[in-house]
Image (tube, coloured by chain):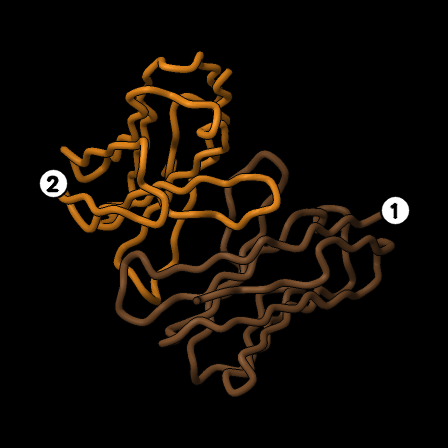
Chain colours: A brown, B orange
Amino acid sequence: KNQVEQSPQSLIILEGKNCTLQCNYTVSPFSNLRWYKQDTGRGPVSLTIMTFSENTKSNGRYTATLDADTKQSSLHITASQLSDSASYICVVSLRGGADGLTFGKGTHLIIQP
Amino acid sequence: NAGVTQTPKFRVLKTGQSMTLLCAQDMNHEYMYWYRQDPGMGLRLIHYSVGEGTTAKGEVPDGYNVSRLKKQNFLLGLESAAPSQTSVYFCASSYFHDSYEQYFGPGTRLTVT
């Protein structure tokens, strides 16, 4: 069964600190891995999309890594800001299908001043 | 551009009532999707469309119907609402599937009593 597991479930850090969120997946055949940010009461917004051949991708203070061999990804947030408080969702796409996205449950991140 | 919009934002229904959720996108995307998001679970695909006039079932289609009469609109219908359909519903669209980014709407919070 295709699954996406994220850890930790929730995380609290102080403003200005760095943090790393983890994602493990068993989706096959793999097409790409995405990280989304979802603010409370809003829809998810894409941060990065990585294909099999990409192992790092950055978007401002967000850096995602992908190890396709171990089927693991991480999202690193540098110099956190209060606006980073949100849920971060890891999503893995199956190759070839319009219905092929498997969503993780998300990591709920709280940045404290 | 408004991106993806959803109507209504909130709705309370009684068991057995019907309603239609409207999704509109102004990005000329071919693909449109309806998801539901429940506490402690990842987003789950209800139905999707790969173009005007087409629809297909996703992971959790029971109790829902959809229509895509115009390329820019994707309607989700509940014929006889049940408490188990209490959820937050998100519409999304993408130019194509697989490696293309999905853009999400702001969501509709539906409560069935």
On screen, residue B24 versus residue A93, left or right, reads left
- Spatial CA distance of label 1 from label 2 is 50 Å
Q: Position of residue A65 (x, y in %)?
A: 59, 77
Say the numbered circle drawn on residue A80. none
Q: Is residue B9 above or below residue A48?
A: above
Is A22 above or below relative to B40? below
Tell me where residue A27 sits by quadrant: bottom left
Q: What residue type is labelled 1?
A: Pro
Residue at image coords 73%, 52%: A109
Residue in the picture at 54% in, 39% down: B38
Q: Residue B19 versus residue A53: which sits nearer the camera?
A: B19
Q: Mark 1 points at which residue?
A: A113
Local crowd size for mark 2, using a 10 Å CA cut-off: few (<14), some (14–19), many (≥20): few
Position of residue A111 relative to residue B76, above or below, is below
Q: Position of residue B72 (x, y in %)?
A: 23, 37
Cβ atoms under marks 1 and 2 closer than 8 Å: no
Which subunit holds the residue at mark 2? B
State the count of labels. Answer: 2
Which residue is at a point 21% across and 47% down the rendered structure image? B56
| Mark 1 crowdedness (10 Å alpha carbons): few <14, some 14-19, many ≥20 | few
| Marks 1/2 same chain | no
The residue that disc 2 covers is: B53
Quarter where residue A35 is shown: bottom right
Q: Position of residue A84 (x, y in %)?
A: 70, 51
Furthest-left residue in view?
B53
